[in-house]
Every structure is written in structure tokens, then in C-alpha cells.
Amino acid sequence: MLGVLSKLFVNDDILLKFVNEDNQLFDFLSQLLIDFNNITRDTSRTHQPVNDETLLTLTNLLWSISFHECYHEKFEKNATLMNVVSDLSTATSLSVTTQMKLMPRDMCSLKKAAEGILWNLKPASSPSSCQISDEKTQQPLAMISYSHSNTTFCRELVENLSAHVPVWVDYKQAKDAVAHSDDLWEEIARAMELATAIVLIVSKEYYNSKSCRQELSYASDALKKRIIPIYPGDQQYRASGWLGIRIAGQKYIHFGRKPFAEAIEELSSVILTDQKLNIVTLTQPTVTSSSSCATHPIKMIDEENKLLSAMKNWTTKDIRKWFEDNQIHKDLITLLIDQFHTGTALIVYARHLKLFYRNEYIRIFKNYLKIFHGKKMNTFDFIQFVDALYRLRSDYDPNSTIEDSYEKQSEQQLPPTIKCTNDPITRL
């Protein structure tokens, strides 16, 4: 039963529904973890493998819950639970890793899961700016984030991409001339901090992995790094949920739609372009106002754009045609169509959405729930809308890349907290 629950809790909607509808579920799982931790300390027990697997599953379940900030207080108020999790995260020898014949592929080791819980409960903090700035002025570094189920493709990718840009990937860490800590996650986090871009190998296995979710959350939410999604040649999976929201609108590269060498060239070009933008932004002079002592970035390039000017004349009919041509769900059209009266309004909203997409997701989700009498918006329908907006902006606004490069340095995004109510909302 716990194993089934662990698989279901990969989906945030299901997790929130279960935990919100049963107020005692969190306390029940916490107490079970405490009890089974005590049992596993008794080396004379006769059902050790079964108990080990139960302990592993419980820790992974609580790790899934810890991705939701609204439950952090419950963790922190349970001192006994926190002591157990802390002990599990620092244990050097855990019987669960040796007694179980085969660890389920959708679970992480006991130590890793416990470390994941503690990491999620840590207050968000930014890495050292001086360390990051120094690295950004040097050669670009691509960090590869992937599920180990995609190791074969990852190795081929790294071998070819390394000919163009320096690459950091976990399986090479022991060979690289990088100062390593004893904790691999700390090394991964450090690599993300130094990277120009995070190359994400998209797959169903990535979505199902809590370790991958932790990586992407740190890179996207805390570091605000550029994420470059890539799809292996045989990949048919369409990203949804927490993964889909984070990569919506990002330029992606599908290795199944072009020759491998051409895809590598395109990927390296994107990384190198990002590096140049970072260096330009870091070295641009600023103008200081003598009256307010405030600094302002240099004036954006003012480029004449006939296409953008033409969008000002879009009629309601043109806007509706854009929605329909991009196959936006009819319910979202009903909800949003009257909010836009010109094509340029769509462009402005696309930029706003890029900066505050989590907040916009929550706002639209709640309005959808209200307008359609409790019907829940499909996450992928929202992603389809966001992706269409980002493509529109990229096609019609020549300054979008420059604007984003400045925003990336000063953006202060509102916290991605979603109130836990009886109305389940996907955790972003």
C-alpha cells in the first residue's frame, strides 16, 4: 500500500488531495517512520528486509510532501521526526542499502531521501555572488541534469558536446579537476551555481524522480538559471505538472527531429550565446543618479520593428484567430479572450508571465475554478497557452532576448508558495 502511495505522490494534484482530505495522514506517516526507524535498529529482528523497505518508502513519501512549503511547519514542529530524518541523512552505514535485493527504480536511497527532506526545509538562499560572477567571466559551463534511466543518451551527448563547451556531469566528477565535497548533492548544487546553462534531458523518468525535481527546483527557482530542455531521439513524453511549468516556453532541442551533429551544434550555440549575454550584462556600465544614488541599466536597444507595430492594429477577431491557431483550450479562450484588445497586449503579457508565471498560474487556476463552477484547469492546457505566448514574443519582439538578459540579473520573483486548501493546486 505504501509503495502504491509513493508512486501516486509523484503527481502533485493527487498528493495534495490525499494530504488535505485526511488531516491525520501526515502525522500517521511521520509516526510510522519514527516507529520503523526504531525497529530497524534492532539487529536481531527476523523481518529486517521488509522493515527496511517500509522505512525507505516512508522516507521517500515524506520527501515528496516536503516539496510543498505549506507542510514545512508540520515537519518543523515534530522534533522527534526531524531528529530521525537528521540521523538518517548522516548515517554512514544503513542496512536498507544492503538488505534489500532490489531498490524500486522510482525511489532513492534512504540517505538521499532524508537529505532531500532537509534540503527542502532549508530557507531559500542565494549562492555567493562573487564566486558566481568570477566564473561567469570565464568559459561557459553546461551542467547536465538527467535521470539515470537516460544514461546511454547522456554519455553520447556529453562526449559530443564537450568538443564545443566545457561540460559538468555527475559521473565524471571523480575525474574532473574540481574540488569535490563528500556529498554529491553539494557538488551538483555547486556545478549549477557555476553553470551558464542547465541542459535538461526531458523524460518521464525525470518527471518521476524526486532527485531530478530537487535539482531543477534549485536551478530554476533559487538560481534563476537558463534551462535548455532537450529530448532524446526516441522520446515521446510530453512534460506536464511541476516539470512542464518550469520548462514552458523555453527553447528546446529535439534530437529525433534533426541529425545528431546538427542538434549538438545548435545546443552549443545556445549555450555560447547565453555566455556572451551574461558577460555583456556583467560588464555594462551603469549611470548613477546624483539625486537618488540609484543605478539604472543602460538604455535598451530601440529597434524599429514593423511586425510589432502591425500588432497594435490587431482586432478582436485577429486575437481570437491567434488563440484558435495555437490550439488554446476553449475554456481558456473563454476565460482570457476579453482581457486582450491589441496584439501588443499579448506581447506585454508574455513578458510579465515570464517573470511571474507561478503567480499567474495560481491566479488563472483560481479564476478558472470559479468561472467553471469547480472544474479544475488542466496543467497541460495552461502550458500550451504559455508556450504559444513565448513563441509569439520571440517571433514579433526583437528585443526580447536583450530584455530577458537584463531581467535575469535583477529579477526578484515572488515566492512560489501555494496555500494548502481543499482545492488541490499543482505545486509549481
Image: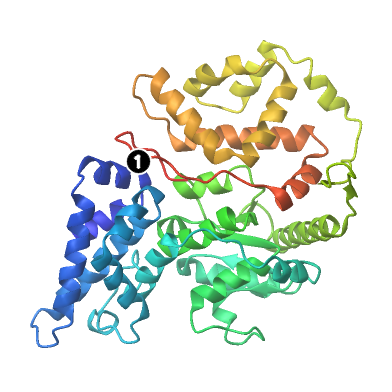
Amino acid marked by disc 1: Cys
The residue drawn where x is 90% and y is 40% is: 301
Q: What colouring does the structure picture have?
A: rainbow
Q: Residues within 10 Å of mark 1 (few under 14, many from 20)?
A: some
The residue drawn where x is 65% and y is 57% is: 225
- Relative to residue 355, is residue 205 depicted above or below? below
- Relative to residue 251, is residue 175 depicted above or below? below
The residue drawn where x is 61% and y is 87% is: 175
The residue that disc 1 covers is 420
Q: Residue 198: image x %, image y %? A: 63, 61
Number of residue marks: 1
For residue 337, side relative to residue 129 (left or right): left
| Viewer-nearest residue: 120 or 338 | 120
Answer with the quarter of the image where residue 326 lies.
Answer: top right
The residue drawn where x is 52% and y is 44% is: 245
Q: Quadrant of the N terminus?
A: bottom left
- Relative to residue 41, is residue 272 depicted above or below? above
Q: Residue 49: image x %, image y %? A: 17, 78
Q: Residue 77: image x %, image y %? A: 29, 58
Q: Secondary structure at mark 1?
A: loop
Q: Residue 87: image x %, image y %? A: 31, 77
Q: Is residue 3 visible?
A: yes
- Relative to residue 183, is residue 11 depicted above or below? above
For residue 76, side relative to residue 314 (left or right): left
Q: Residue furthest front?
A: 291
| Viewer-nearest residue: 198 or 205 | 198
Q: Is residue 234 visible?
A: no
Answer with the quarter of the image where residue 265 lies.
Answer: bottom right
